[in-house]
Image: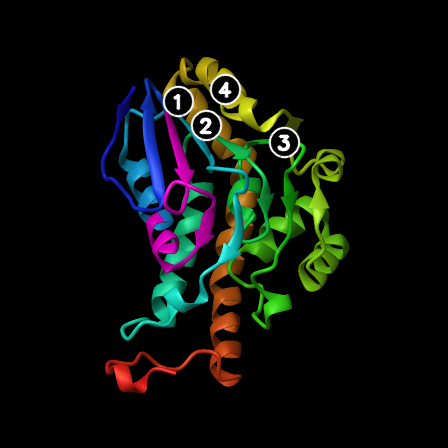
Amino acid sequence: MTKVVPDWKRIAVTRYARVTEALVHTDGGPLVFDALVHRELMELADWLRQDRQTKVLVFGGTGDAFCAAFDTRSYRTPDSSFHDIWVEGRRGVGGLLDLDIPMISVANGPALYHSELLVIGDIVLGCPETTFADHAHFTKNIVPGDGVQVVWRQLLGPSRATYFLMTGAVIDAEDALRLGVIHEIHPRGHLLARAHEIAGPMSTLPSETLMYTRMALRAQDRREFNESVSHGLALSGLQMHLTGQRRPPVRRPDELD
């Protein structure tokens, strides 16, 4: 077991033979979603795409929650622009979905912000404390256009997904299992071990088997995501600009709100 580089600040990456584990975090605890992890998720997907050693990805969070808090101030820096969000948004979730290796997700607790990062996994494991919601968009006066609308529509169907995204409704672990959002429930402390138990045999298969299987099973998901996310992000950026939530990039501290 060796720690691999690059050594991101929000993603702890560990190599286990042909299985790579990537856990998002803030200072070793549950992730507080911010602009830094938004960028690092894009970099993770780009790095994995070029990494020939990894044959299976285990993805999750640390501590007792996947992500239950959001740092909005991190997006309001002097050199920030919505262009960065647009690029990173397409290549973060979309990049993970486009990988040619299986992805096993570990939902280690509440995923109230950017839960789509977990549920795009080919196999999704949860614990009794796992919950899913979207508290990052519509209930916060933001258009849900960064891919969350695509992923949850695929999982829940159009009517239930619309309700879920517009009300901030919370789906608990048992309902998630019943709906097919997660596939197994285990105690939190056993989740990673179970993920690696599944990943190990997968990682012994030929790369061609893994690649072509994922292409066959996820082709429609990839196509729908890629077709919809740019338009959705553009609508989100337009809404924020017109309602005064996002100003053009600023360069001087005295121009900040």
What residue would you read off at disc 1? 208
Q: Is mark 4 on a helix, strand or loop?
A: helix
The residue range painted magenta reads 20-40
Closer to the camera: disc 4 or disc 2? 4
What residue would you read off at disc 4? 193
Going by the image, does 244 lie left or right of 137?
Answer: left
Which sits earlier in the primary sequence, circle 4 or circle 2?
Answer: 4
What residue would you read off at disc 2? 212
Residues packed near mark 4 inside 10 Å, few (<14), some (14 to 19) or many (20 plus): few
Q: Are the two marked residues, 1 and 4, in contact with CB atoms closer than 8 angstroms?
A: no
Going by the image, does 256 lie left or right of 136?
Answer: left
**Residue drawn at (39%, 22%) of the image:** 208
Q: Can the viewer see residue 3?
A: yes
Total count of labels:
4
Q: What element carries label 2?
A: helix
* Residue 127 disc label: 3
The answer to which quarter of the image holds residue 249 is bottom left
Question: Which residue type does callout 2 highlight?
Answer: Tyr
Closer to the camera: disc 3 or disc 2? 3
Going by the image, does 97 lie left or right of 159?
Answer: left
Is-magenta flag for residue 2? Answer: no
Q: Which of 4 and 9 is in front in this view?
A: 9
Q: Are the two marked residues, 1 and 2, in contact with CB atoms closer than 8 angstroms?
A: yes
Which sits earlier in the primary sequence, circle 3 or circle 4?
Answer: 3
**Above or below, comparing residue 18 to residue 170 in the picture:** above
| Separation (CA) of disc 1 from disc 2 | 6 Å
